[in-house]
Amino acid sequence: MLTPEGNIIKHHNKRLVEHILFELECEIELDIDQLSNYTLYAALVDLLTEKAYRIGVINDPVHNAFGGLENIQQFQKWGDLFSDLELLGLDYPDIIQITDIEEVENWIKENGEVYENSINRFINHYCTDLNVRN
């Protein structure tokens, strides 16, 4: 069994794989637009790449707080986030608020090697933790 992108359907949860197999056996024609265990699994496997995850992190509003007074209020609400990052030895990304990914990536590079490595360590940690593929 393969996903639409050709990735093998495999998972440590045997029941999930058996359920996907049962769903597919019951279909005469596969409609990938229909919500099912197969389409959810395929979307996760086919779309969750390191590049896609990096774009998600960069676009996450938690990682690019507002400036000024709003910034202070947001940081007060994110105490648990900062505690977790401290325990993991990671820095808060603090990414600029720009919608164009290429501009954000350029901004990250322009802020120096230390900052760029900090962002990369943050993303790599969670890619490893979530088992995101390259």
Image (tube, helix red, strand yellow):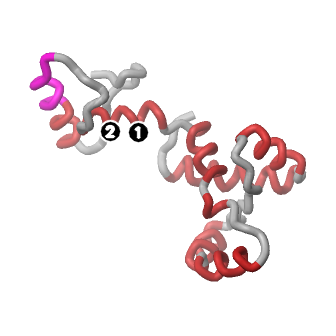
User: Is residue 102 magenta-colored?
Assistant: no
Q: In which quarter of the image is residue 52?
A: top right
Quarter of the image with the C terminus in it: top right
Quarter of the image with the N terminus in it: top left
In the image, what residue occupies the spot 37% across and 22% down? 4
Range of magenta residues: 21-28
Of the pair 43 and 115, the residue shown nearer to us = 43
Of the pair 102 and 49, the residue shown nearer to us = 102
User: Residue 108: where, in percent of width, then height?
Assistant: 81, 49
User: Residue 100: where, in percent of width, then height?
Assistant: 72, 41
Left or right of 123? Residue 21 is left
User: Residue 77: where, in percent of width, then height?
Assistant: 59, 79
In the image, what residue occupies the spot 26% across and 37% down? 35
Q: Do the residues labelled 2 and 1 touch (CB within 8 Å)?
A: yes
Question: In the image, is residue 44 above or below residue 91?
Answer: above
Mark 1 lies on a secondary structure that is helix
Disc 2/disc 1 C-alpha distance (Å): 6 Å
Left or right of 32? Residue 57 is right
User: Is residue 22 magenta-colored?
Assistant: yes
User: Residue 34: where, in percent of width, then height?
Assistant: 25, 32
Question: In the image, is residue 71 above or below residue 104?
Answer: below
Of the pair 114 and 28, the residue shown nearer to us = 28
Which amino acid does the dot numbered 1 rest on? Leu
The numbered disc on residue 44 is 1
The numbered disc on residue 1 is none
Mark 2 lies on a secondary structure that is helix
Left or right of 112? Residue 18 is left
Which amino acid does the dot numbered 2 rest on? Leu
Q: Quadrant of residue 5?
A: top left
Question: In the image, is residue 62 above or below residue 114?
Answer: below
The residue at which mark 2 appears reads as: 40
What is the magenta segment's predominant secondary structure? helix
